[in-house]
Image (tube, rainbow, N blue to C red):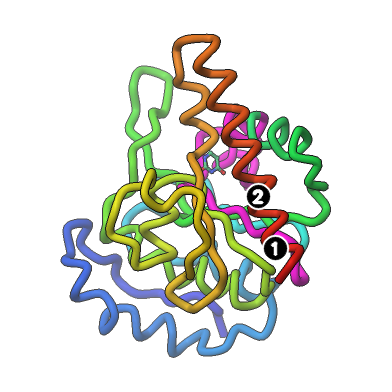
Amino acid sequence: MPLAPQIEPLHPKIAPGDLPARLQPVAEHLKAPKNIKDLRRAMDGCRECPLWRNATQAVPGEGDLSEPLLALVGEQPGDQEDLAGHPFVGPAGRVLDKALEAARIPRAEVFVTNAVKHFKHEPRGKRRLHKRPDRGEIEVCRWWVKNELELIKPKLVVALGATAVQSLSNHKGSLTAARGRTFETREGQPLRATVHPSFLLRVPDKAAKEAEFDRFVADLKSAAAVARKL
Ligand code: URA
């Protein structure tokens, strides 16, 4: 029996309020995914929103799969992640690696994943330009990230950027308001928020870029410090 639901995709503009009932078949089918391996296998077959159509594959989370110190949740795979099938292997991933090293957080103690599992993009000549997932897509895909986090049981979850905050929590304010404090995911796991590493790539001024990088490293350090005390 296939693990993934084979049902018609949602309309991209479906109201988020309609989602829980529509998502029922997924939840029913994979009621309690026994392990992360089954969940990852099923993910590639997800047809709950249209993003799979133009993506190479779903990109599941990876890293420490058993009670990692931190689970870092980004937005969605980028061009390189879509092709490779691994999260954070492109330019944003290199910034993240550098920041984790500066924060002295071993990669072996971290699980890295995304709020949305398929790459959303639009063609621009030969390039595929990243497009931000909309609310409906984030809500639909939440089921996958929620189950990843429930299975691996990180000590603390770190939302990288506004999309991850939106997916993981009920926080309605800005990312700035969420940054620097410990709150909870919708499922009650400890959560902190910081910027997405790709934000650092876009800061034009060299001094400002360095200052933002240092702030990002400080956020990761304090998330790890909080996690170690839990
Ligand atoms: N940006 C993300 O949010 N996730 C990735 O995996 C790559 C880039």
Q: Is 101 situated above or below 108?
A: above
One can see residue 53 in this view: no
Instruction: Identify the amino acid type marked 2.
Output: Ser
Q: Secondary structure at mark 2?
A: helix
Instruction: Identify the amino acid type marked 1.
Output: Ala
Q: Residue at x 50, y 39 (%)?
A: 196
**Residue 69 painted magenta:** yes
Q: Is 196 situated above or below 39?
A: above
Q: Is 7 situated above or below 11?
A: below
Along the polypeptide, which appears first: circle 1 or circle 2?
2
Q: Residue at x 74, y 67 (%)?
A: 229
Give me the C-alpha separation between circle 1 and circle 2.
8 Å
x and y percentages locating residue 149 in the rendered image: 59, 70
x and y percentages locating residue 28 in the rendered image: 44, 90
Graded by Cα atoms within 10 Å as few (under 14), some (14 to 19) or many (20 or more), the crowding at tag 2 reads: some
- Whether the residues at callouts 1 and 2 have beta carbons within 8 Å, the answer is no
**Residue 124 painted magenta:** no
Q: Is residue 157 left or right of residue 196?
A: right
For residue 37, the mark is none
Q: Is 6 situated above or below 54?
A: below
Graded by Cα atoms within 10 Å as few (under 14), some (14 to 19) or many (20 or more), the crowding at tag 1 reads: some
For residue 222, the mark is 2
Mark 1 Cβ and ligand 1 under 8 Å apart:
no
Quarter of the picture containing the C terminus is bottom right
Which residue lies under the disc numbered 1?
Answer: 227
Q: Which residues are magenta?
A: 65-94
Quarter of the picture containing the N terminus is bottom right
Q: Is residue 184 left or right of residue 177?
A: right
One can see residue 150 in this view: yes
